[in-house]
Structures are given as C-alpha cells and as structure tokens.
C-alpha cells in the first residue's frame, strides 16, 4: 500500500517531526530508536509515516507537540491502537524495543522514500512481541519481524 505526499504535506511533517524531536529531548524523553540514524531525521520520517497512515485510514493524525513516550500513534476506525515503525531501508524489518507498550494493539511498517510512503505490512502485538523475535542488530536487543512475516493490507 503506497501513498505519495504532496510538497506541503512533506513540509508539515518535517516541521512537526523536528519540533517533536527538540521538545522530546529537551524534556528528557529518551530516544528509543533502534539504529544509528540521526534522532531528528528519525522523528521526521516517523512523522511522515504516521501522517500518511492516518490519511489512508481516514482518521485525523496526531499533530501534537507535547512530550510523549509510550502512547500509540493513533487509533484505527476498528478501534485498534497502532504504532508506526518507519525506515528508509527498502528491506527493513518491523522493529520494536524490548520495552513493551501496553497501549498498542498493532504495529505497522512503513518504508519512507520521501515523498513516497510504502506500507509493507502489519503485525498484531502478540505476533511481534515474543522471545523468538528478539534480535540484536548491533545497537542493542529488540523485537524484529521480516517483511515476509507481516500481514498485508
């Protein structure tokens, strides 16, 4: 499932992503990214993926700027709470830290090649968060699923 953002949407996501990064770091929210990418850039691609998914689900995106940690990225019309995981890598895995988020039901993987967003698939929390999915990619342990193990949209 793909979506291409228009230039104005990209600029809005860049602004909100960078502002969220500044606000979170200045308020002591730990950067929970898995990988060596720049935290601010990770927040921008994350915002793009969140915005695009909300648009596809026909729900209003969370554009808030208050510091947050552990909350879902949004709620689908079905009522399932989702967490978007974004990457720039075409063959990215769906990754999550070992800190289990009790407020999330579904994890979604999006590959971002601005302005195009490619939603590779999704997994129920219980399909991702289990001991057999723990992996270390060189930046600490976390949960991971390959794209071929994700449910398609």
Image (tube, grey):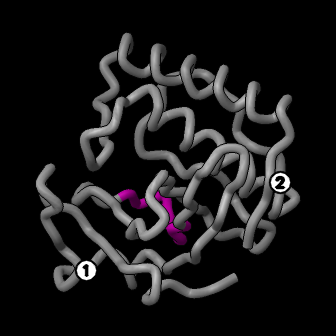
Q: Looking at this view, name the residue that lies furthest to the top.
A: 26
Q: CA distance from mark 1 to mark 2?
A: 30 Å
**Marks 1 & 2, CB-CB < 8 Å contact:** no
Where does the N terminus fall, quadrant-wise? bottom right
Look at 48% across and 15% down and name the residue there: 23
Specify which label sits upstream in the sequence, 1 or 2.
2
Residue sitting at 39 percent across and 84 percent down? 127
Q: Residue at x 56, y 33 (%)?
A: 44
Decide whether the magenta segment is chiefly helix, strand or loop. Answer: loop
Vertical order, 68 against 140 (above or below): above
Residue located at (18% from left, 85% from top): 132
Drawn side of residue 22 relative to residue 12, left or right: left
Secondary structure, mark 1, is loop
Q: On residue 107, which mark appears?
A: none
Residue 134 located within the stretch drawn in magenta: no
State the image quarter where residue 53 is shown.
Answer: bottom right
Q: Please give the range of residues in magenta.
A: 101-108
Q: Quadrant of residue 36?
A: top left
Packing grade of label 2 (10 A; few <14, some 14-19, many >=20) is some
Dividing the picture into quarters, in which one does residue 149 lie?
bottom left
Q: Is residue 104 magenta?
A: yes
Judged by depth in the image, the label closer to the viewer, 1 or 2, is: 2
Q: Is residue 127 left or right of residue 81?
A: left
SS at mark 2? helix
Q: Determine whether 55 is above or below 149 in the image.
A: above
* Location of residue 134 in the rendering, given as x and y in whole percent from the top left corner: 18, 73
Q: Position of residue 123 (x, y in %)?
A: 50, 79
Labelled disc at residue 130:
1
Q: Which residue position is annotated with label 2?
A: 55
Please state the horizontal and vertical placement of residue 40, each as a whole percent of the image: 44, 26
Pointer 1 local density, CA inside 10 Å: few below 14, some 14–19, many at least 20: few
């Amino acid at each position: 499932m793909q979506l291409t953002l228009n230039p104005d949407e990209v600029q809005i996501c860049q602004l909100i992503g960078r502002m969220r990064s500044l606000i979170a770091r200045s308020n002591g929210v730990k950067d929970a990214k898995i990988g060596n990418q720049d935290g601010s850039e990770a927040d921008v691609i994350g915002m793009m993926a969140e915005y695009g998914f909300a648009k596809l689900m026909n729900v209003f995106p969370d554009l808030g700027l208050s510091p947050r940690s552990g909350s879902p990225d949004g709620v689908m019309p079905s009522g399932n709470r989702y967490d978007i995981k974004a990457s720039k890598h075409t063959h990215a895995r769906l990754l999550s830290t070992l800190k289990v988020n009790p407020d999330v039901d579904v994890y979604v993987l999006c590959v971002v090649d601005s302005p195009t967003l490619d939603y590779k698939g999704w997994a129920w929390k219980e399909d991702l968060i289990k001991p057999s999915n723990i992996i270390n990619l060189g930046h600490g342990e976390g949960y991971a699923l390959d794209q071929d193990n994700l449910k398609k949209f």
